[in-house]
Amino acid sequence: MIKKSLLFLGNFSFSKIILAFLSLNLFIFLLYVNGIESNSLNISLKYFLFSNETIVPNSNNSKENLDNSTFPTVSKNSNLSKEYGIYNKTLCPMIPAKLHGRIPVKYFNGTFIELENSLSNLSIEKGGLWSPKECKPRYKVALIIPYRNRENILKIFLKNLHPFLQKQQIEYGIYLIEPLQNLTFNRGLLMNIGFIESLKKTNQKWECFMFHDVDLIPEDERIIYSCPEQPRHLSAFVTKFNTIVSGEALFGGVSALTKDQMKKVNGYSNLYFGWGGEDDDFRYRILQNNFKITRYPLEIGRYLMIRHTSDQKINSERFNLLKKTVERMKTDGLNSIEYKLNDMIIGKLFTKVIVSYDENYLLKKIY
Ligand code: BGC
């Protein structure tokens, strides 16, 4: 019996074993990309395949699947398909063939005109919009970026993100949300405004939202900018001053939610003026609504934080606000927001939404 088994093993050449290993690796990666963390793949197997991983983030999130309901298939005979002429295009692949893995961050220190010229071959439409021509995109994704006084970082962001997103063959739009200079920065409120304003144009029916800091640049092409069935924290591992920052209790940086998920949690709180707390509050809302947060493993979910000096004052009220997140979340958010739209600038590489709000009024109204 033992002899027979040895003979059987002997028939396998080394190259066949390597081939089987690579195929298994690819299979697991495909599952991750689709947001599937199957129970049948045990944790130790994932640990082994994703090499030096010490944490398997959200190994208990076993039910995450691609939300196909967001992308209904249109029958060839329907009016909709005729109107959009989409029946003659095939759906873009779920995982585009050209995604290889780790990518270096490109730095840029020219002018905006030089940047626009350097990206002119990408056919970006006015307002920073783009859609693949060769296939029908599976995902319609709006990037919502709170922004102020970060020109040099913004240029690096655009230099990297436009080609990165196009490689993924998704339809996307880049929205910067900027408060007037005299106002206290409020990241959550700006995210809510970006969500509302980006949905106002009826021809841009965004279904998936990336709430994105401008100083974070993805370092791996396998970070797919789509929305799986559960909210996803994309910037799970951030290289900041040469140290990797991570943690399951974090939800800042870059996170993905569908339009319906965002509505269900009533968006971000509008009350966090200054630095800190709004992302913790958002995370509580998500968990309180019975969603599970998913993350890519260490090998994939990597971002580089571009260095800058902080000009934000720390919000010392954040701990008091956080104590009452659950109590407040139904009345503090998308349904209670008040702001003024001062301007909408349609740039070549982005849309900039300039807004103002009354801090005292908002705090008194809700808090
Ligand atoms: C803050 C968060 C921040 C996190 C990591 C927390 O204390 O409230 O806003 O994302 O620290 O820096």
Image (cartoon, rainbow, N blue to C red):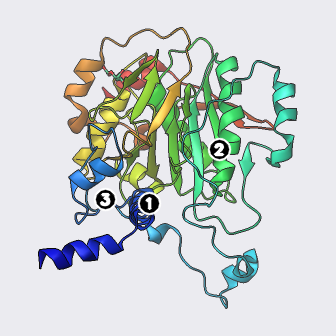
Q: Is 293 drawn above or below residue 303 in the view shown?
A: below
Disc 2 marks a residue whose amino acid type is Phe
- Local packing at callout 3 (Cα closer than 10 Å; few below 14, some 14-19, many 20+) is many
Left/right of residue 317 with respect to residue 118 in the rendered view: left
Q: Percent x, y for residue 87?
A: 70, 81
Report which residue position mark 3 lands on.
37
Residue 147, picture quadrant: top right
Q: In this orientation, which residue lies closer to the viewer: 204 or 291? A: 291
Q: Is mark 1 within 8 Å of ligand 1?
A: no
Identify the residue shown where x is 73% and y is 52%. 130
Q: Is 87 drawn above or below residue 95 in the view shown?
A: below
Quadrant placement of the C terminus: top left
- Local packing at callout 1 (Cα closer than 10 Å; few below 14, some 14-19, many 20+) is few
Disc 1 marks a residue whose amino acid type is Leu
Q: CA distance from mark 1 to mark 2?
A: 25 Å
Report which residue position mark 2 lands on.
164
Q: Percent x, y for residue 334?
A: 43, 42
Q: CA distance from mark 2 to mark 3?
A: 25 Å
Q: In this orientation, which residue lies closer to the viewer: 1 or 85? A: 1
Query: Which label number is shown at residue 22?
Result: 1
* Precedes in sequence: disc 2 or disc 3: 3
Tell me, yes or no, if residue 329 can be seen here: no
Q: Percent x, y for residue 292?
A: 27, 51
Q: Quadrant of ligand 1?
A: top left
Q: Secondary structure at mark 1?
A: helix
Q: Secondary structure at mark 2?
A: helix
Identify the residue shown where x is 23% and y is 19%. 320
Left/right of residue 153 with respect to residue 208 in the rendered view: right
Residue 286, picture quadrant: top left
Left/right of residue 47 with respect to residue 226 in the rendered view: left
Q: Percent x, y for residue 50?
A: 36, 47
Disc 3 marks a residue whose amino acid type is Glu
